[in-house]
Image (spheres, rainbow, N blue to C red):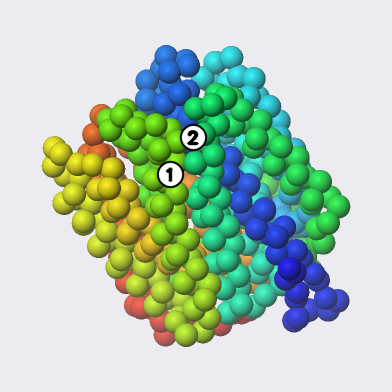
Amino acid sequence: MHSRCSNQSPTITVSTLQLLFLSALSPLSLHIIIPALPAIQQTFSVSAAKVQSLVALSSVGIAIAVLIYGPLADRFGRKPVLVAAGGLFVVGSALGALAPTIGAVIGGRVMQAVGGASGLVLARAICRDIYREDKAKQFIAFLMLSTAATPLVAPFIGGLVTDRFGWRWLFVVSGLFGVILIVSVVTRLQETLREPLPLPGLTGIFSPFAALLGVPLFRRYTLALAFASAFFFAFMSAAPFLYVQTLDGSAAGYGAWAAMVLGFFIAGSLLVAQSGARLSTDHLIVIGSTIYISGALLAVWRLGGESWVATDLFGTASIMAFGAGLVISSAMAGAVSLDPKRAGSASGFSTFAQFTFGAVAVTTLRYFPAAKPDALIVITLVCAGGSFVAAASLFLGRHKRPRSGQ
């Protein structure tokens, strides 16, 4: 299956499978390691907060990287940036697999995160290179399905590998995928960037963001998807400890429950992909944020007491995941479609916001006991409320909406 650009000449053909793979690499490397967090804690005899910093620092690394990848790819092209980033990913995988200390594990994972972030940004930018807004919205939602489908499988695989062979093999598996990425990009990817933007020094990397942030609609889209994303970072950092240590579950068991949650996220993204022109981007975001905050309020009720079970934890998360799937896919498509010439930068900054908010959410967990869901409840309410307010604000400036391509 190929994505074909029909509005430019000459025609550019990009493999849909390749775009899906680019989008999947970063979530694969992160979610495959999540079930192993308690095992890593046991190996190095460190606190849960120390191990959770693996997720927080990885998020910071991605947040910084995506700010740079977008403008660099808008200047030098999608292909060379992807190759360089893939090399960094492979080196980080090797470091994590051989790490003698928890610091080395975290360092390797951060290198993985920085390298893998290129796929998150540039798969969406490539999509915007070859499609206009309506079609881009559907295809980006399709890419979000890949981003979600990977974590659907990755935690389960990660749990099985950890239980049977040990957590170090998870870095080996990720590294092999990194090698596949490099070979695929070098041999099969066509360059889709048509009009390179100038990059006059270091300030040129960040100047496109100032232009984008001057557009109120871009800010609203970014806030909506950032708040919706932050919940996932907090959940995947807290849930393994809540399930494995508090509920006495296994790493593989956590993977199965996490797959259910991410299945609901896929359903939300799939609904966006199938919506076409029947529902506007803004309406989808509002619907999604309403479902999201409803799930958050249910979580307060189910997890707020002393007695709760796995269905309370993962059931309420599933409702929120469905709403978040609607919000994130729609808001990302809206953000990258506002200014096609800066699609790479728009994708980069939106992803930066996602991972920055995620890093803050994970860091907040340090101030609460790992064995109780109190922190997750607080973070969930804040994130759901923020996403809902951002979604509602979209309708305040509808008369000022710019046309795609302007």
Quadrant of the drawing holding the N terminus: bottom right
Residue at position x 41%, y 74% from top? 284
Going by the picture, which residue comes out furthest to the front?
A: 164
Q: Residue 198: x, y in percent?
A: 75, 60
Q: Nearer the viewer, residue 55 or 152?
A: 152
Secondary structure of the residue carrying tag 2 is helix
* Residue at image mark 1: 256
Would you say the residues marked 1 and 2 are in contact, meaning their CB atoms lie under 8 Å apart?
Answer: yes
Q: Position of residue 41 (x, y in %)?
A: 43, 21
- Is residue 383 visible in the rendered structure shown here? no
| Residue 353 against residue 157 in the figure, above or below | below
- Depth check, front residue: 120 or 239: 239
Three-letter code for the amino acid on which mark 1 is drawn: Ala
- For the point 66% across and 63% down, which residue is it? 125
Residue at 37% over, 26% down = 49
Q: Name above or below for residue 94 compared with residue 209.
A: above
Q: Position of residue 261 (x, y in %)?
A: 40, 52
Q: According to the image, label 2 marks what residue?
A: 159
* Distance (Cα) linking label 1 and label 2: 9 Å
